[in-house]
Image (cartoon, rainbow, N blue to C red):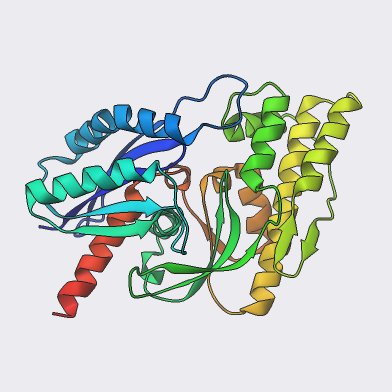
Amino acid sequence: MSRFLGLDTSNYTTSAAVYDAVSGNVAQAKQLLPVKEGERGIRQSDAVFHHTRQLPDVLSRALSSAGPPDFAGIGVSTRPRRVEGSYMPCFWVGTSQAQVLSEVLGIPVYEFSHQEGHLAAALYSAGRLDLAGQEFLAFHVSGGTTESLLAGPGKESPVEATLAGTSTDLKAGQAIDRIGVALGLPFPCGPALEQLALQSDRIFRVHPSLNGLDCSLSGVENQCRKMMADGEPDADVALYCLKAVGAALAGMAKALLNEYPGRPLVFSGGVMSNSILKNDLNQQFDCFFAEPAYSADNAAGVAILAALAAGKAQQNG
């Protein structure tokens, strides 16, 4: 058997995926958690409730498109990051389901962090799965995370990540969502803010706030709110927000590459599906991105990691 099931119950998306290690094909299904209009997030108790309701249907859709459930193993995300104290209750929904399926099917469970799943999904969709098990540089940019990382093989995962730099205050996804909500856009606001920004032809030259490998993004929100108060067009506000986030990421990437030269650079996370950010960074760096379907929270990465971990265990006898 060469197929592996992946489960990920993150803070905003319920997802399941099946990865075939021989063909390289992925079948996946996902569903966003409902967030009330005008709100900028969801309580963990509500997230657990909605994951519990949604997971059976999401899993059924993934399995129906993948064929018979003849799996060799299950990959599941159990926490946000592979660091002590990293914990969110929502991940217990996927973890408990994986444990039940493991007992019923008699197959092993491989546990990974949500962040590692993002990195693996990015490598897979960029056609660079060969980097798994090697050292590379990475960014994880999402609603709750803006981090640069040193990634490489570890005892528990082929893509264990060590923090290099971070945003010391507001995260990129938070800045985007806060401005999006202020502009009356639906949450999560990334796709709608991008479409609004594409209507602007303004040229912005942004000087990011950087300190070594770290950045600060609180000034992005402040400037955007000032532009709104001054009556500037919504499209210009949206474009400035994305250009400012992109300038901060570019500054972090330059500092990271100066510190660790010669290593491949990979961008992952839901924010990195944004075409404006992707185009700006592609013009400055030789880098790789996850395709949009593999940028947002999904189970494909942990299914792929399970296959890699099982292959390594088999090699080691």
Residue 155 sits above or below residue 9 on the image: below
Residue at image location 9% in from the left, 41% down from the top: 68
Residue for point 56% across, 47% down? 142
Task: Name the image quarter holding the C terminus.
Answer: bottom left
Give me the residue at 76% from left, 29% from top: 235
Q: Can residue 70 be seen at all in this image of the molecule?
A: no
- Place residue 152 in its image quadrant: bottom left
State the image coordinates of residue 256 (x, y, percent, origin top left).
65, 71
| Count of marks overlaid on the render | 0
Q: Nearer the viewer, residue 196 or 105?
A: 105
Q: Position of residue 246 (x, y in %)?
A: 70, 51
Along the horizontal axis of the image, is 151 left or right of 309? right
Coordinates of residue 135 in the picture (x, y in percent): 46, 76
Residue 198 vs residue 227: left or right?
A: left
Instruction: State the quadrant of the N terminus.
Output: bottom left
Which quadrant would residue 254 be assigned to in this image? bottom right
Whether residue 137 is visible = yes
Give how far across and how far down residue 141 sits, in percent.
57, 51
Q: From the viewer's perspective, tell me whether residue 32 is left or right of residue 194.
A: left
